[in-house]
Amino acid sequence: MGTRDVGLLYMKDKELRTIAKELPDTKVNSLLAIDRDLWIGTDHGLVHWNGSEIVKSGVPALLQ
């Protein structure tokens, strides 16, 4: 789940966890799931979760 102030939330082992420090901004505006990738749009750029980490690879420079 994307949030306005906390970043990205996910469930693991029945526990709610957060991802914030890897994001360009803690305000998540949009999420797009394609296969095993999750694209995350924030006020300060676009990144994607590749299944194990948040990365900027594959994101056009204009959108980073």
Image (cartoon, rainbow, N blue to C red):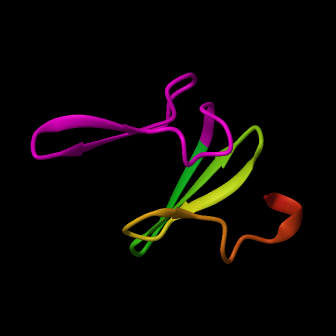
Q: On the rendered structure, is 13 left or right of 39?
A: left
| Quadrant occupied by the C terminus | bottom right
| Quadrant occupied by the N terminus | top left
Residue 2 is situated, as x and y percent measured from the top left of the image, at 49, 37
Residue 62 is situated, as x and y percent measured from the top left of the image, at 89, 63
Q: Is residue 3 above or below residue 60?
A: above
Total residue callouts? 0
Q: Is residue 3 above or below residue 23?
A: above
- In the image, residue 11 lies in the stretch drawn in magenta: yes
Residue 39 is situated, as x and y percent measured from the top left of the image, at 57, 60
Q: Residue farthest to the top?
A: 5
Residue 13 is situated, as x and y percent measured from the top left of the image, at 10, 46
- Residue at 75% over, 37% down: 43
Q: Is residue 22 above or below residue 27?
A: below
Q: Residue farthest to the right?
A: 62
- In the image, residue 28 lies in the stretch drawn in magenta: yes
- Residue at 80% over, 71% down: 60
What residue span does the magenta drawing correspond to? 1-29
Q: Nearer the viewer, residue 13 or 41?
A: 13
Q: Residue farthest to the front?
A: 21
- Residue at 39% over, 73% down: 36
Q: Nearer the viewer, residue 32 or 40?
A: 40
Q: Is residue 26 above or below residue 42?
A: above
- Residue at 54% over, 41% down: 21
